[in-house]
Image: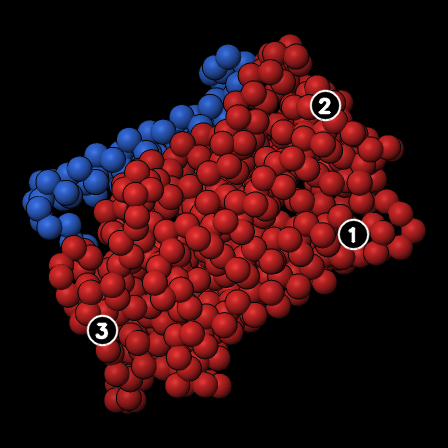
Amino acid sequence: MSSGINGVALAVFLFFFLAVTVMGFVAARWRKARNAMSLDEWGLGGRGFGSVITWFLMGGDIYTAYTFVAVPAVVFGIGASGFFSVPALTLAYPLGFIFVPRLWSIARRRGYVTPTDFIRDRYGSRALSLAVALTGILATMPYLALQLIGLQSVLTAMGIGGTGASWFARDLPLFIAFAVLAAYTYSSGLRAPALISFVKDTLIYLVVVVAIIYIPYKLGGFGHIFAAADKAMAKQNPVTHAPAGAMVPSPATMVAYATSALGTALTMYVYPHNATTVLASKDRNVIRRNSAALPIYSIMLGMLALLGFMAIAAGIKPAGGNAQLVVPELFGMMFPSWFAGVAYAAIGVGALVPAAIMSIAAANTFTRNVYREFIRPDATPAEEAKVSKLASLLVKFGALVFVIGRNPTFSINLQLLGGIWILQTFPALVIGLYSRWLHRWALLAGWAAAMAYGTIAAYNVPAAGKPGSHFGGSSAPIPFTHVTCYIAIVALVINVIVTVLGTFILRALKVDAGIDRTEPEDFTFTGSETQASTVLSPVQGSGDSSLLA
Amino acid sequence: MTARRVIAGLCVAAPFIALLWVSRYAALGPQLWGIPFFYWYQMMWVPLAGVLTVIAYVLLRGEGKTSR
């Protein structure tokens, strides 16, 4: 596929890319507030997003180019075990339904921009809030880098980039795409991905619906697809003599499957970029309503995952053995050129939206919880917005450096680690929404123990068929047992045990637990009371907002 | 703890039991349109979890003030 440029597909792709770029810049003037230079405006879109926009934005977080490219790639490679992201997303909604409204309420009531702002206020500990902030930024970076890899795989499938003598020629298209993204994120903030996500999701829906009807039809039905997949999964590795994968999890992998699903669902709302979307919505019920409406996204994810099996049935052998190319190559093979272009645009725009949200979230975290906290405590709102805009550029540039000239496996492994890390902020954040019993120093100790265990355990996992290699997967035996389990969950259990024991000890020793600045009624604040305006005045949109709200 | 809250709690808990108990559904049959049970069962739970979450939402909203 990488031989020669697919002209028609490229033209269609460029059309959508340009359209989205225009939207990205125009977004700065969409529902504009009088005082645009503040973090509430740039970083949270004025906190005025209604159900429809929030729904698209949340989908933008969950449905990334990476999901589009990597989930089918894993199913293509190992079968059933790659399907865990479907139950993970299914479980994410009831979870969000339980605790996210509380996070929204406290954040709206007290003007938080990031989840770390809450931790700072709740526990009165700068050390703990710094630990959570840095974990958030560190975990977001590789996730952002993976969006680039998704974009890169599409560019490669179209025959531009990916080849050439120097890294510069190879990655120039990617570089340009990202520079454009950085420019409109800088000028429009969260409004840019919010507006573009309409286009993105329309494209993705269209492509997925066409793909799941048209491709199985061309391949002779699901029966044939699963038969071909079954045969491919049973094939033995010539070195290890282990089968390539399995069509259903074996008893030995069931715990890993269940814990991967649960762990991924739990991380869903502790990633800073997911919280950004939640905090940008204008009222508490928007969150609950959306928790119920979002599953429509996961139906698509299930079908998307099955594209991996369809690629097997279609006989796709990705160029250079790079599994990330499976889906782009399948689209190129199955669809006429012009629709392949639409599909590539869907994946490409699907990379830009979450990349923008992630860089904004990481930038907000840096500004509020590192810059204002440790460098300039008296920073004005305008200064905060300025720092955040610059930080968003830096974060994107960092992710680009990460990807250029490196094997995609490197970023995927780091993303794996990111998932393990970010889940370790769960006790401080989520338990903190319900109870103040846990001690700040115990939380910090639990976090440190879990981070250490998780990192070491992930380092010790060899890649399949390569003994002695590192970061080869995200599941490992639970210490002192033979039960294989998702590392993030084991680390979380260690985290909670250390935190609870530590809290008992510290409370017995009467160590200062810090000042809690929150009030119990802050957690159920609905946003409709008039006192909302004393903290933050919600943006009153013009005509279009009533339509979208 | 009213009956409404109990039912809402069950609605939210059901998908967890249904999906985390993997041995219950790690099977190839019965197939649906050629799709093995393992795959269609999990995809079926996607809209089901959505419906249950809507029921929980309506039940809690009916209580007047949504707390928790």
The chain whose colour is red is A
- Relative to A395, is A55 on the left or the right? left
Which three-letter amino acid code belongs to the residue tagged 2? Answer: Ser
Q: Residue lying farthest right?
A: A165
Which three-letter amino acid code belongs to the residue tagged 1? Answer: Leu
Looking at the rendering, in which quadrant would you find the C terminus of chain A? top left
Q: Secondary structure at mark 1?
A: helix
Whether residue B40 is situated above or below residue A85 in the rendered picture: above
**Which quadrant would residue A403 be assigned to in this image?**
bottom right
Whether residue A89 is situated above or below residue A490 in the rendered picture: above
Labels 3 and 2 in the same subunit: yes
Labels 1 and 3 in the same subunit: yes
The chain whose colour is blue is B
Marks 2 and 1, the one that precedes in the sequence: 1
Which numbered circle lies on residue A172?
A: 1
Marks 3 and 2, the one that precedes in the sequence: 2
- Measure the C-alpha gap from mark 3 to mark 2: 57 Å
Which numbered circle lies on residue A518?
A: 3
Q: Chain of mark 2?
A: A
